[in-house]
Image: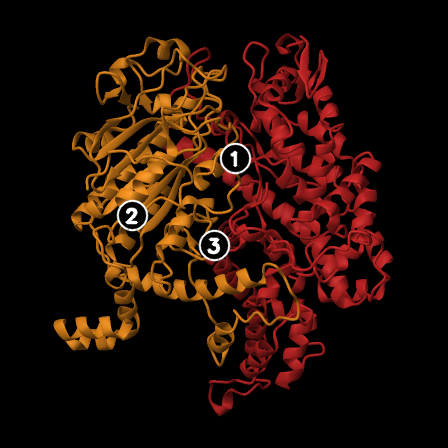
Chain colours: A orange, B red
Amino acid sequence: MQSRAGFLLGSLSGLTVVAKNADFFGRALAQAPLSGPTGPTDNNVLVLINLQGGNDGLNCVVPYSMPQYYKYRPTLGIAQGDVLRLNDQVGLNPGMKSFKAMFDKGQVAVIQGVGYPKPDHSHFRSQEIWQTADPEGYSSTGWLGRYLDAAKLPKDNLFNAVAVSPVLPEVFGARTVDVPALDGNLRGYGLTSDRKAGGAAAFRSMLSDTTQPFNSPYLGKVAEIEANAQRGSEELPKLVAGYKTDAQYPNSNLARSLALAAQMVGSQLGTRIIYVTHGSFDTHTSQKGTQDRLLEQFSDAVSAFYADLAAHGNDKRVLTLTFSEFGRRVAENASRGTDHGEAAPVFMLGGNVKGGVYGNHPSLDDLDNGDVKYTTDFRSVYATVIEKWLGRSSQGIIAGNFPSLPIIAA
Amino acid sequence: MLATTSGSFRPAGSLDAGSALLPYRGAWNARRAAHLLRRAGFGGSPVEVSAFAAMSMDGAVDRLIHFPDTSQLPAGPQLGEDEPRKVLRAMAMMAAAPGQPAPALTTDQIKAIGKAHFDNSVAMMQWWIGRMIATPAPLQEKMTLFWHGHFTTAYEGKGITASDIVTQNQLYRSYALGNIRKLTLAVSHDPAMLKYLDNRANRSQHPNENYARELMELFTLGIGNYTEQDVRESARAFTGYTLDADDQFVFNPRQHDDGSKTFLGQTGNFTGDDIVNIIFQQPAAAQFFARELLEYFVYSDPEPQLVDAIAWQLKKNYFDLTPVMSVLLRSNVFYSDRAYRALVKSPTEFVVGSYKLFSLPPSDIDQPVLGAMTRMGQRLFYPPNVKGWDGGAAWINSGTLLTRENLASTLCANPQMMQTATWLTQGASLDPKTLSSHIVTQVLQDDISPALRVQLDAYLNGAGTSALGMLSGENFDERIRGAVYLAMATPAYQLS
């Protein structure tokens, strides 16, 4: 398969290039979606942005038309004149100017009031719920891990999915698929000195040998990741090195992560899912400065990312979805902050998204013990992504029956 | 809650519950002594391993459990002022007139505040890691690390100063194997914790539930053992637990809600201390700490019968840890094959253990080492969140394993290493088989697959190089460094 694809392309476009670089171009070609099952969604990429810590939904998508909002938020309320209006009911945080520009171009869907029944107020449990899509049980796999298990993407591609994160997130917990976790600038992703002289490489190639004189439950995992790390780290920098861009990214960790994402998308690695994080949004005290800055960073990074993608003709191939473990309590606390709450908006942008504001904004008159009640189940959002964007049935991936939302154009 | 990324990492085989906690009477040798030193410390140098192997098992455990005097170690790091207003005052850059709002900070001012903070974080890490390496009481530092990951607090935001963090760290050290209930009371009065989980802003008119919730969910009981109503009621009990102008704990009766509360089935005009005491009456508390201790010291996902047995030990000893750990570290289950190499070394264990392996001086812990620890997933004093570090499978991914290997490579290139690690040359040989055997014993306690051992011999003998590449006095230094690096890249070295 691999050599055939390399040969075919080689004979069309001049043999010498392929022959000289057979090793890594050959693999790159094999990893391009050419070899997978063909279908209209096979080139589509999902970028998942985790807004960690609990992003305050009410000061992100501001219900400026609701008087109760200002009653509950005497110091934190964002004045009507400062809100970046999306319609006559809600508008964006004033830090999100570049994001508003994308909304105005029809590239952003705002889904209001997303959550789940019996919401949990713990960061960890609620993160786990959002990442596993399992509010009632304790699933050991993540919703995207289950997608990867089901999708049967090319096995020898180490980059079907990538987490730009120091620790592998639960969303990629899978039965059969191993997802590399790496940092945004690839620093440290590779061996600085392999001490190759005389036989070190042969030794290293056998590190995955599990016939050890001890029987650790972690042995298989360490050996497998060791082998993947070695191969992946040798290949990834070469695979993305050819990507040229004039895009100007702002100086933030999120921007660096997204710049790498654009590089991976543009290098035809066959990568389908990229996970990045931003935060911390856990604003129990002095919320305003922190949240406004984080949202501005988010907005500027995403805007630069799509400019980069568009310059390479990839913007329609990449759908971005945001989530956060919860919104925050409607009433501000005494420390000019907000405590853990429940439902909040999520953003879907890029790709074939039909821009606009979706769902109903939760009522501020009918609260659940001080929190807004959800109006859209988050599993409907995930089902939409799996069915309309990644091109699979969500059965077996998202438990229960959650209808897709009409947000992504066919 | 377990890390759920890849299911259970409970060892294969079954637990013999009847004899699990009975004293181990099997063979005592360097392999078992090294196991004890890895678990109850950060790994021993070859000299320490031999010394512990020469004792009896009981003697070795006694030596670890009864901490020797550590007063010769530096009690704390040298800290600079990091409170932003004081940093600026020291720089004479405070422009605001009294009573006027402070002007927006300039870039230089922001940089100065950031630098003060960063310098302190480095000083604290160097101090603590240095202690872990040099201490004659490794279990004291291991427990301090356990509590740091358990009652965790980050040196980040919320007005938390370096001295708050050092005070908290010393609290954990003073309670290392002390009473868990009393430690929990002390944590509830600890300035760093009162800031980190916002209890200092918890007032009767505006309850802040952050501390009350995490106290039960992450610190003592675990989810499912209390209700949302219990969270609200206990938050009321903790109102008024705040800080005075000098950032010391104070109980402020005017901010305290002294009304009646109903908490976990009991009703009274409870304070926060009452809440802690009620929590420790719950069977779930003993279960919770038993599981934590087993996961940290024995193996992942311990069987319910084993958890019950340790929970009973905790209850019997009123949550005093010394007698409980004394039973655990002498037990059959602790020395069983199922527990052997059954945990993943944390980055801290990897670094401290490697420094001890080479007897490198703690003063060597510098920015490259600290940066590597961050990339391995453990920046001390900066836990990822209030749950602390997940550990186990979460330590292992492509990025973290590569960083471990790169750090091993850096350490093996250290010019001092051949002098400080005397075992490298003592008992070394120019015969590749003898030399590889020596390395594999000292670095891995012989935990290497037969195939890898053959490859290591081949490497030492210059496989793949010219005839001149055979092991000789000329290339001995370079070759032995390379072979030790390769041994540190094996799976066994990642496991405890």
Q: Chain of mark 2?
A: A
**Residues packed near mark 3 inside 10 Å, few (<14), some (14 to 19) or many (20 plus):** some
According to the image, label 2 marks what residue? A390
**Residues packed near mark 1 inside 10 Å, few (<14), some (14 to 19) or many (20 plus):** some
* Residue B74 visible in image: no
Q: Which mark is residue A125?
A: 1
Can you say whether B468 is above or below A96 in the image? below
SS at circle 2: loop
According to the image, label 3 marks what residue? A175
Amino acid type of disc 2? Leu
Q: Earlier in the sequence, mark 2 or mark 3?
A: 3
Observer-side mark, 2 or 1, equals: 2
Instruction: Report how many numbered discs are placed on residues in the image.
Output: 3
SS at circle 3: loop
Residue at horizontal 52 percent and vertical 40 percent from the top: B384
Q: Are marks 2 and 1 in contact (CB under 8 Å)?
A: no
| Distance from the alpha carbon under mark 2 to that under mark 1 | 27 Å
Q: Which mark is residue B17?
A: none
Dividing the picture into quarters, in which one does residue B252 lie? top right
| Residue B307 percent coordinates (x, y) | 73, 44
Dividing the picture into quarters, in which one does residue B487 lie? bottom right
Q: Earlier in the sequence, mark 1 or mark 3?
A: 1
Q: Chain of mark 1?
A: A
